[in-house]
Image (cartoon, rainbow, N blue to C red):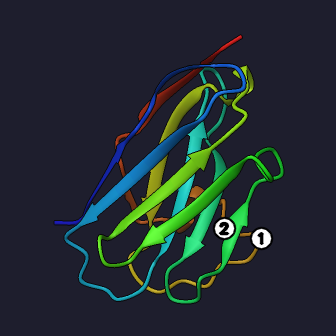
Amino acid sequence: EVQLVESGGGLVQSGGSLTLSCATSGFTFAGYLIGWFRQAPGKEREGVSGFETQTGKIYYADAVKARFTISHDNRKGTTYLQMTNLQPDDTAVYFCASTGGPTEATPGTVFRPRLYDYWGKGVQVTVSS
């Protein structure tokens, strides 16, 4: 059974940092696309960052460029999202998601939720002003 489990969320003051982790298990495919999404109350789910494990391509949404860094440890099957200079607008539930096999995305497709087959339950990130 494929599982994705997020951790590392919490409460942080404006300007602070957090690192989220997405631990995967049950994967039987060699390559996949991992995406980080977030959803704030009353807003649609939006893409934050993506990583293609088979090519190493990385994607960031404009709202987080230069502040967030995605990385992947293939041996551990874990993807990280390092978030710095957090602002109140970053407050949301953060989800990681994965495709069910090798997927080459484009900047125009990587943040489409329908592209992904598996989702974690999410972790809360709250940034106080």
Residue 44 appears left or right of 78: right
Return the x and y of residue 11 as percentages of the image width and height.
Answer: 50, 19
Q: Is residue 93 above or below residue 75?
A: above
- Along the line of sight, the residue nearer the viewer: 16 or 91: 16
Q: Amino acid at mark 2?
A: Val
Q: Secondary structure at mark 2?
A: loop
Label 2 Cα crowd, 10 Å radius (few <14 / some 14-19 / many 20+): many
Q: Residue at x 83, y 51 (%)?
A: 62
Q: Residue furthest front?
A: 16
User: Label 2: which residue?
Assistant: 110
Quadrant placement of the C terminus: top right
Residue at which label 1 appears: 107
What is the quadrant of the N terminus in the image? bottom left
The residue furthest top is: 129
Which residue does the image show at 25% across and 76% down from the upper left? 27
What's the distance in space between the residues labelled 2 and 1, CA to CA?
6 Å
Query: Residue 61, relative to residue 6: is it above or below?
Result: below
Position in image of residue 52 (x %, y %): 56, 78
Q: Nearer the viewer, residue 83 or 57?
A: 83
Asked whether, in this view, residue 6 is left or right of residue 125, the answer is left
Q: In the drawing, does residue 116 fall left or right of residue 70? A: left
Q: Residue at x 41, y 66 (%)?
A: 117
Residue found 58% across the figure and 34% down from its top:
39
User: Which of the pair 106/90 is nearer the observer?
Assistant: 90
Residue 39 is left or right of residue 26, and the answer is right
Mark 1 nearby-residue class (10 Å; few <14, some 14–19, many ≥20): few
Residue 25 x, y percent position in the rendering:
22, 66
